[in-house]
Amino acid sequence: LDWANWHSNTILDYSGQAIPNNGTITGATSTRLSGGLWVLDFDGTDDKVDVGDSVTLTGLNTFTIEAWINADTAVTHTIFAFSSGNAFATNDEFRFEATLGAGEKQLTWYARAVAIGTVIYSSNINALNNGAWYHVAISNDSTNINFLVNGSGVGSTALGAVYAPTQGSGLDENNVGMLLRDGIAQLFNGKIALLRGYNIALSQTILQSHRNQERHLFGV
């Protein structure tokens, strides 16, 4: 998603794929950082960016998600979530989230498929605090789930039976900044910028280079 290019309430997908995953903004507002970059500010109440239910978001044996985040509060924040609907009892659910401030201070990939079960992969406990910008990333190389903060590895866990959305599971609630389940939303409160997803596992070297090339935009 190109956060600098939106028209009305839509963020355009410039990945070049045949079926784009344009994002529809609900509630989140744009704000410009001192470095000139436009970012989205989520209020933690009902804001989200809906990226639709394209098949390009499922059937991923390998993937990477990266973003810059700056949370306003010391709670658990949904960065990106795939869900096959509102009802927890009958629907699959996958989410990339960050817990900041007091307590765990870690990144998590929560993977749940009704037919198989739930696996929760977490990074090491590290210094994730609210009120600061971090480059965060998760990659699945088909062997391990790997977590990075500011280009440094903060944990790697061997994959279990459930680790990624599968094509045909009806994932239709695919959002930046929100997971909706049983009528209750788990939300992001703060700013998200430059969120990108890939259907390959990017190396730590590449993710470090992204962070180093972009850090001046966030004053870090």
Image (spheres, grey):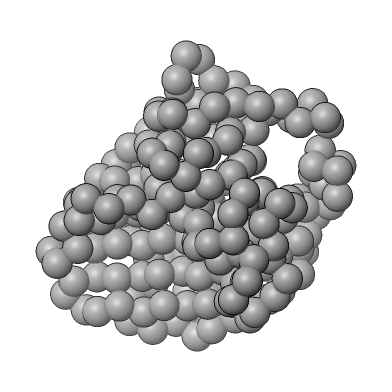
Q: Position of residue 168 (x, y in %)?
A: 20, 55
Outermost residue to the left = 90
In the image, residue 143 sits, relative to residue 171, either above or below, namely: below
| Residue 79, horizontal then vertical, whole percent | 50, 52
Nearer to us in this view, 208 or 18: 208
The number of numbered discs placed on residues in the rendered structure image is: 0
Q: Quadrant of the N terminus?
A: top right
Q: Provide residue 30's location: percent of width, then percent of height.
A: 60, 26
Residue 110 higher or lower than 31, as above or below: below
Q: Taking the image as drawn, is residue 39 in sight?
A: yes
Extreme top residue here?
A: 8
Residue occupying the point 62% across, 49% down: 72
Q: Quadrant of residue 128?
A: bottom right
Q: Residue at x 82, y 29 (%)?
A: 34
Taking the image as shown, residue 196 lies to the left or right of residue 185, namely right
Q: Position of residue 10 (x, y in %)?
A: 45, 22
Q: Residue at x 44, y 29 (%)?
A: 27
Judge by depth and name the residue closer to the eye, 15 or 82.
Answer: 82
> Going 43% across and 50% down the picture, which residue do you hit?
187
Can see residue 177?
no
Q: Determine whether, in the image, residue 20 is placed left or right of residue 11.
A: left
In-front residue for pair 34/116: 34
123 over 57 or under it: above or below: below
Residue 143 in the figure: left or right of residue 40 = left
